[in-house]
Image (spheres, rainbow, N blue to C red):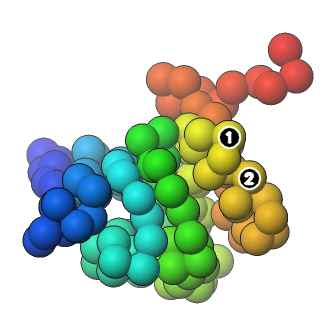
Amino acid sequence: MSQSYVRRHPDRSQAGGFEVVVAAPRVVIVRGDLDAMTAPILADVLLPLAGQGGGVVVDLSDVTFLDASGLRVFCAAVEALDGRGQIMACNAPPRIQRVFELAQLARLLEVQALRAGVPVDSTA
């Protein structure tokens, strides 16, 4: 049986309500600003999952901001996988997806929109 849990920044007022929810064994939901203050919280959850190998889905639909600190967590997760799986960053709002594109991280991890676990065809 899978166990879900939530990690929050200890001072939610400073972190803007940031939280990381492990919704299923390999599904992580991120909410709020992903920056230097909150990136370690995501790292504490994502890096151990990536270290186990296999795929990890990270739902970014409720991420409101992403900076280099957040991007570094994704790079570290890809390194932790060591070719034994893939990180899928899904449902990122357009402004967040643009940050991944500008940082050229789409080459290292899969960034796409999903609905009910199925990739969305953006050409339709």
Q: Nearer the viewer, residue 77 or 70?
A: 70
Residue drawn at x 58%, y 43% as measured from the top left:
92
Residue drawn at x 27%, y 46% as measured from the top left:
24
Quadrant where the C terminus is found in the figure? top right
Looking at the picture, which amino acid does disc 1 mark?
A: Pro
- Residue extending farthest to the front is 14
Q: Is mark 1 on a helix, strand or loop?
A: helix
Vertical side of 40 occupied by 11: above or below: above
- Residue extending farthest to the top is 124
Q: Which of 36 and 81 is in front in this view?
A: 36
Circles 2, 1 touching at the beta carbon (< 8 Å): yes
Neighbor class of circle 2 (other Cα within 10 Å; few <14, some 14-19, many 20+) is few
Q: Where is residue 75 in the image (x, y as percent from the top left)?
A: 60, 79
Find disc 1 in the rendering and name its residue.
94
Q: Where is residue 12 in the image (x, y as percent from the top left)?
A: 16, 61
Residue 84 location, quadrant: bottom right
- Residue extending farthest to the right is 123
Q: Distance between the residues labelled 2 and 1?
A: 6 Å
Residue 16 location, quadrant: bottom left
Find disc 2 in the rendering and name its residue.
98
Image disc number at residue 48: none
Looking at the picture, which amino acid does disc 2 mark?
A: Arg
Is residue 56 shown left or right of residue 17? right
